[in-house]
Image (cartoon, rainbow, N blue to C red):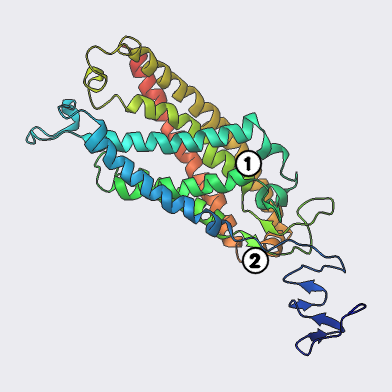
Amino acid sequence: MCGPAASSQNDLHINGTKVNGHSINGDSASGHVVNGQHSSRKKQPSALRRMAPMILWGYAFDTLFYFFVIHALLPRDLSPLPQYCPADNPGCTRRDLFAFQVVSFLNLSYLGFTGFHCFFVSKRARTILPRTPQGRYLGHATGKGALLPEADRINAAIVLFQGWDFFVSLFFEEHCTAIMMTHHALAFACGFGCLYYEVSQIANQKCTERPRTTDVFDLSLLDIVYIGGVCEFSSIFLSISHLFEFYSPSDILGPSSSLLPVLPAVITFSQAMFVITFFLFRIVGWALEARRLFSDATYLLKNGLIERYAPGSGWFLWYLMTTAGLLGALQVYWFGEIVQKVMEILDG
């Protein structure tokens, strides 16, 4: 039958608007009719739901690979250096500590390279986000998905690694310290909160200065790419140098390995790069990014934009600012210890 279809008895009319697709005052849940314009966009799942498979599979991978290193990868006759085993425990091998460092290296490499590429190589973190406080902090997405998926992956990797690291560190005297456990807890909460407080909605006012249709906001996109990703680039070099702390290199690689002559140079290079990148990314860069975070956060709070775009997440913005300050102070403390260690080496 041609012409306008007759209204079904099941159609609901509100203010003269037919509601068969749950449309109220021109807004349709199935077609998103906004101001008379139809859109085929579907409501995006929250970042926490989107990234849950990566987090859960990541926990499984880290745990399985940890036991694989212990039981299958390392030679059976390894003897750790004396300082890592008590004298009254002749059966001590510390294969667990080595496996822990291998898993840490993999996770930190993913975080570091993802953040470094997004921030400095592709420069998506600095070019694709709107250059406004609400754009840098909240970001936005279209119906095709997250505007900056690297931020979601970094947040998920933070939740994965910091959660796994916290639990496993309970069994390592070397890592179960108040400072390290607090660091893991604070970082885990940052990553989890950034995923959890993503808001899926049709915004009445956009994050950009020009009109643009958006429906998903990701908390602290630019900041998490740098603080959670780029800063971990320095940890890659630290992990490499740590891999050869527990055993004699010849025990791991074999006495006839062709890599033995170059290994000291690799370790020295990794240690030097750790110091350099730590200073550049965790001291200088951290200070610059934290300053921008504080400036953006002040603007969002002062103008009520955080409650407009992400209702109920104002406390988390305060948490991010506080944590950025605390972890920044911790970076300075660690760098002081690094400088002291370097001076001891130079003094002979």
Comes first in the chain, label 1 or label 2:
1
Quadrant for the N terminus in the image: bottom right
Q: Position of residue 13 (x, y in %)?
A: 82, 85
The label shown at residue 268 is none
The reply to whether residue 230 is visible in this rendering is no
Quadrant for the C terminus in the image: top left
The residue at which mark 2 appears reads as: 311
How many marks can you see? 2
Above or below: residue 332 compared with residue 306: above
Quadrant of the image occupied by residue 38 = bottom right
Q: Please give left or right for residue 239 compared with residue 278 in the image.
A: left
The residue at which mark 1 appears reads as: 291
Q: Residue at x 36, y 23 (%)?
A: 341
Q: Residues within 10 Å of mark 2 (few under 14, many from 20)?
A: few
Q: Residue at x 32, y 27 (%)?
A: 243
Q: Position of residue 148 (x, y in %)?
A: 65, 45
The reply to whether residue 135 is visible in this rendering is yes
Q: Please give left or right for residue 17 compared with residue 48 in the image.
A: right
Q: Secondary structure at mark 2?
A: loop
Q: Secondary structure at mark 1?
A: helix
Residue lying farthest to the front in this orientation: 1
Q: Residue at x 71, y 64 (%)?
A: 308
Amino acid type assigned to the residue bearing label 1 in the image: Arg
Q: Position of residue 345 (x, y in %)?
A: 34, 16
Above or below: residue 298 compared with residue 331: below
Residue lying farthest to the top in this orientation: 261
